[in-house]
Image: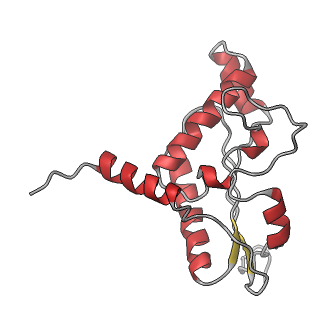
Amino acid sequence: MERYSPQDIEAKWQKKWEDEKVYKTEADPARPKYYALEMFPYPSGNLHMGHVRNYAIGDVMARYKTMEGYNVLHPMGFDSFGMPAENAAIKHGVKPADWTYSNIENMEKQQKKLGLSGCSSSFTSAVSPTRKRRPSTGATPAARCSRTSRSSMASAGAAIRPCRRKTSRSGS
């Protein structure tokens, strides 16, 4: 029996998906719209199991809605404004910008290893050339790990679906 090596198998298939752009989105005005959004992680450290749970659930929903025929807008980004990333940088004696960019790069790698459909380089968003670019990657923070370009987002015209669940607090 052949030995199972998840690292080899996962790397093989993730490369194939990247090469074939299986997660590439195309807007089709004839299809209904669906917007799937999970919280953006703070780039203050590594991903943890809470992140895995959150993004795996969102990824499943986005894929399911895609298979149902929806135009799915499922963006991924990073919440790098605020205290968590800055406090972590200070704690480790690193400049906040360097800490944040380093963690974003690491978190993107971790998300790709998980096979999440939103972190493929084929989905890097278009960014205004006037925005400052990070020398090591050539991308701006806003362009990192995004599924669709801003023009694709506008042409897809994704709409936020309101929550329609009944709750005891609202009485509806």
Q: Which residue appears at 31% of the width and 47% of the height? A: 8
**Position of residue 116 measured from the top left corner of the image (x, y, whole percent):** 53, 56
Q: Which residue appears at 74% of the width and 24% of the height? A: 97
Q: Name the one closer to the observer, 76 or 15.
A: 15
Q: Which residue appears at 51% of the width and 42% of the height? A: 110
Query: How many numbered circles does the render carry?
Result: 0
Locate the C terminus by quadrant: bottom right
**Position of residue 113 measured from the top left corner of the image (x, y, whole percent):** 46, 47
The quadrant where residue 88 appears: top right
Residue 158 visible in the shown view: no
**Above-or-below relation of 120 to 103:** below
Q: Name the one closer to the observer, 117 or 163.
A: 117
Q: Name the one closer to the observer, 90 or 118.
A: 118
The quadrant where residue 80 appears: top right
Locate the N terminus by quadrant: bottom left
**Above-or-below relation of 65 to 119:** below
Residue 145 visible in the shown view: yes
Q: Which residue appears at 56% of the width and 80% of the height? A: 67
**Position of residue 63 measured from the top left corner of the image (x, y, whole percent):** 56, 71
- Asked whether, in this view, residue 154 is left or right of residue 78, the answer is right
Q: Name the one closer to the observer, 169 or 22.
A: 22
